[in-house]
């Protein structure tokens, strides 16, 4: 996925004309790296579960994708409307859930 552009407020990124919420820039790089690792693993698990047709595995993989994206600030409450302490706590909670 290549980024075409950010919005002027840098809250969103635009990829091939579609707007996506950007990862919270206030998170520590190590936290972002770990959450993105969990996100990638969960996305791979979604594909495997779909291919295998195992609904319970698919639901669990999707739950893990959602948890990682919430931790990154890409889903849930808008990160730019939250205090930085709350944003960091949300990311750490997601990591605790995913570990």
Image (tube, rainbow, N blue to C red):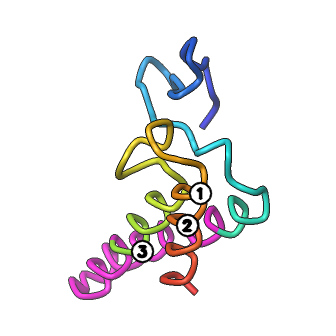
Residue contact at pointers 1 and 2, CB within 8 angstroms: yes
Secondary-structure class at tag 2: helix
> Which residue does the numbered mark 2 point to in the structure image?
89
Q: Which residues are magenta?
A: 35-62
Give the mark nearer the N terminus: 3 vs 2: 3
> Which residue does the numbered mark 1 point to in the structure image?
85
Q: Residue at x 34, y 75 (%)?
A: 51
Q: CA distance from mark 3 to mark 2?
A: 18 Å
Judge from the rendering whether residue 81 lies leftward or rightward of residue 5; answer left or right. left
Q: Position of residue 57 (x, y in %)?
A: 31, 86
Q: Position of residue 2 (x, y in %)?
A: 64, 31
Quarter of the image that includes the N terminus: top right
Of 98 and 61, nearer the camera is 98
Q: CA distance from mark 1 to mark 2?
A: 6 Å
Of labels 1 and 3, the one closer to you: 1
Of labels 3 and 2, the one closer to you: 2
Q: Position of residue 46 (x, y in %)?
A: 39, 71
Q: CA distance from mark 1 to mark 3?
A: 23 Å
């Amino acid at each position: 996925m290549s980024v075409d552009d950010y919005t002027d407020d840098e809250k969103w990124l635009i990829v091939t004309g579609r707007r996506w919420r950007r990862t919270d820039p206030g998170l520590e790089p190590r936290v972002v790296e770990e959450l993105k690792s969990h996100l990638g693993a969960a996305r791979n698990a979604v594909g495997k579960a779909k291919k295998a047709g195992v609904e319970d595995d698919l639901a669990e993989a999707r739950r893990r994708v959602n948890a990682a994206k919430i931790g990154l600030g890409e889903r849930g409450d808008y990160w730019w409307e939250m205090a930085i302490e709350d944003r960091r706590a949300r990311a750490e909670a997601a990591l605790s859930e995913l570990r």
